[in-house]
Amino acid sequence: GAYLYGSNAMIILYTDCYLQKLWTVYELAAFLTVKPLKKLHVVPVLLPLVWLFGLLVMYVSGLVAVYIATHNKFSSGVLIGGIAPSILFVVALRKWARDLERIPERLASFTCAGLLCYNEEDRPLVYRNIAKLMRAAGLIEDTATEEEALHAFELMVKTLLPGALAIQIGQVGFGYSMPTTLAA
């Protein structure tokens, strides 16, 4: 809690497994209880790969266009060289779209007990921290049990995180600067 409270921002390197781990969901929810949403930055790990493939597609497409224009002929090698990066780009975008679709599904069925814990011996510690967070944030009574705290936390995650992640990731999974860079 103190690290998050003292932090200016939080950067999440997001992969599909992020919402499957108890500690990362706790950390994200804890951050959002003490900091505004604008201080959260979600960077999909796949995004740089998609961006690089997009640049590669644009570059190879340009080379293919120059070759065809200067040689006045079209060959299957040129076609394959132009299509292969495009296919890789589409595959990367499709994977990212599937990852995005799983976010609301994962959060809708969220339970603390259903999450992975790297070391199961740490689970009681994280549960106690969740209870402390919920009490400190005034989201439960000071006399609430740990079970009540976990239930309140689960409800908070189900209501707070889908919107927060949707805002930070965007409707299509990346901000306007990425396609702008590719088109330039």
Image (cartoon, grey):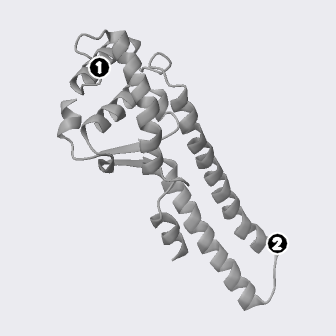
Q: Is residue 50 above or below residue 19?
A: below
Q: Quadrant of residue 183?
A: bottom right
User: Left or right: 25 with respect to 3?
Assistant: right
Nearer-the-camera pick, 60 or 150: 150
For label 1, the residue is 140
User: Left or right: 143 with respect to 89?
Assistant: left
For the residues labelled 1 and 2, say whether their Cβ atoms are less than 8 Å apart. no
Badge 1: few (under 14), some or many (20 or more) residues near its Cα, within 10 Å?
Answer: some
For label 2, the residue is 76
Looking at the rendered structure, the kind of residue marked 2 is Ser
Nearer-the-camera pick, 130 or 53: 130
Q: Secondary structure at mark 1?
A: loop
Q: Is residue 11 above or below residue 33?
A: below
User: x, y percentage for residue 86?
Assistant: 68, 63
Question: Residue shown at 75%/74% (left/top)?
Answer: 78
Q: Quadrant of residue 126?
A: top left
Q: Quadrant of residue 27?
A: top left
User: x, y percentage for residue 101?
Assistant: 60, 42
Looking at the rendered structure, the kind of residue marked 1 is Ile
User: x, y percentage for residue 169?
Assistant: 47, 50
Question: Residue shown at 47%/32% (left/top)?
Answer: 19
Question: Residue shown at 51%/31% (left/top)?
Answer: 107
Nearer-the-camera pick, 134 or 98: 134
Badge 2: few (under 14), some or many (20 or more) residues near its Cα, within 10 Å?
Answer: few
Question: Residue shown at 71%/62% (left/top)?
Answer: 84
Q: Is residue 31 above or below residue 150?
A: below
Quarter of the picture containing the N terminus is top left
Q: Answer with mark 1 or mark 2, whichever residue precedes in sequence.
A: 2
